[in-house]
Image (spheres, helix red, strand yellow):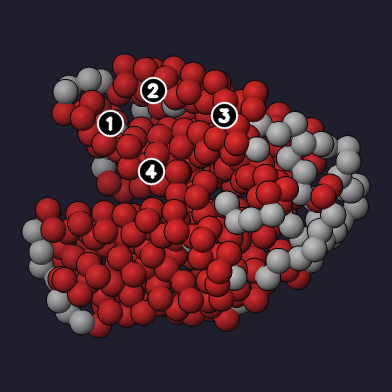
Amino acid sequence: MGRERFSISVIFLVHGLVVASWVSRIPAIQSALALSPAVLGTVLLAITAGALVAMPVTGALIHRFGSRLLVIVTTIFFCLSLPLLAWPTSPPKLAFALFVFGMAVGGMDVAMNVQAAAFETRRGKPVMSSFHGLFSVGGMLGSAIGGAVAHAGIAPKSHFAAAAVIFGALAGVVLAWLSPGSSAAETGLGFRFQRRIWVLGAIAFCILVGEGAMADWTAVYLRNSLGTDAGVAALGYSVFSGCMAGGRFLGDWLTLRVGPVRLVRTGALLSALGVAAATVVEEVPVALLGFGLVGAGFSTIIPIIFGAGARVKGVPAGAGVAAVTTAGYFGFLLGPPLIGFTAEFSSLRLALGLVSVLSVIAALLAPGAQPQDCQGDKVTG
């Protein structure tokens, strides 16, 4: 199992590296195409649209062919789609490239989580949080590399082409070590989504609304509502991300000792407390501490929920993970504009309070994370 765990770890790492490579060069793409903030925001929606299309399709394909083949195909597709983002010469062309990129993001996300959940089931101990922690590490490394490359004046075309080759080769080394799993061994397609899938999807939705809000609005809140300078404002998301990464590497240990239900409940309530502290107490240190609590609280919830989605009785693993991740991505898409529209009619402080409310709802739904006894063929890779 050592090589298999290593291979899955590298796949999660590569996923984070590729995503961060794109994110780190958004300013350069925006400048090259002279995109206004409104146009850029609209074009970026194509990523989530592509992911939402690909996720349920990937779930069905995993049911037919197994997750190993889908991990291989989507990983290669994901790396090859990165260079496409540097070539468009107009907003519509960029939106199309981002839609393709989003399909690769969503497909790989579902496939690698099914593969990871199958490994966790065979191992008999929690491992999902550490895999997601490596995605976070990949995000931080990819952002640092992208920043250095941008500082050196290297164009996105060269950057993305090199990144696609290097990260694709890194993934290619370990793809053969993935579990072959099975496909036909899984139950027939005549299943219905049970109440448990809807509960897990609701938790994912609530948490990823919060993650999207933290990504887009922490710096704005610190800068405009608390009056910090741009450098301090940027610390908000850095603190959130750092605490989330740290929490994920502790997550498997905590899941084993505390249990998934209690950990989801505690994490959601900790996040609600963090947002409340950041928005009620008008002090920058308290706000940064609050955003750190949100990151720590959120850190283990999504790995637990995605893993649980692969282990629902009567629902094939691929379909379960696809349903839960699709609900989560919809929340991630909805979160930032929801906060923005609410702030427009009230205040950003009150709008961010929605994250606290949704976190409390996630805490109330935490019993849905209770493990179920499943037959092996429901969680095959």
Instruction: Determine which residue is flagged by label 2.
Output: 163
Q: Please give the label number shown on residue 145.
A: 1
Q: In terms of secondary structure, where does tag 1 sit?
A: helix
The answer to which of marks 1 and 2 sits earlier in the sequence is 1
| Quarter location, residue 55 | top right
Instruction: Determine which residue is flagged by label 3.
Output: 75
* Residue 92 appears left or right of 206: left
Asked if disc 4 and disc 1 are in contact, CB closer than 8 Å, the reply is no
Q: Amino acid at mark 3?
A: Thr
* Residue 309 % position (x, y): 68, 58
Structural distance between the alpha carbons of marks 1 and 2:
10 Å
Q: Residue at x 57, y 81 (%)?
A: 364
Q: Is residue 117 above or below residue 144?
A: below
Decide: few, some or many residues near mark 3? Use Cα within 10 Å; few <14, some 14-19, many ≥20: many
Decide: few, some or many residues near mark 4? Use Cα within 10 Å; few <14, some 14-19, many ≥20: many
Q: In terms of secondary structure, where does tag 3 sit?
A: helix
Asked if disc 2 and disc 3 are in contact, CB closer than 8 Å, the reply is no
Structural distance between the alpha carbons of marks 3 and 4:
18 Å
Structural distance between the alpha carbons of marks 1 and 3:
20 Å
The answer to which of marks 1 and 3 sits earlier in the sequence is 3
Q: Amino acid at mark 2?
A: Ala
Instruction: Determine which residue is flagged by label 4.
Output: 137
Asked if disc 2 and disc 4 are in contact, CB closer than 8 Å, the reply is no
Quadrant in which the C terminus is drawn:
top right
Decide: few, some or many residues near mark 2? Use Cα within 10 Å; few <14, some 14-19, many ≥20: many
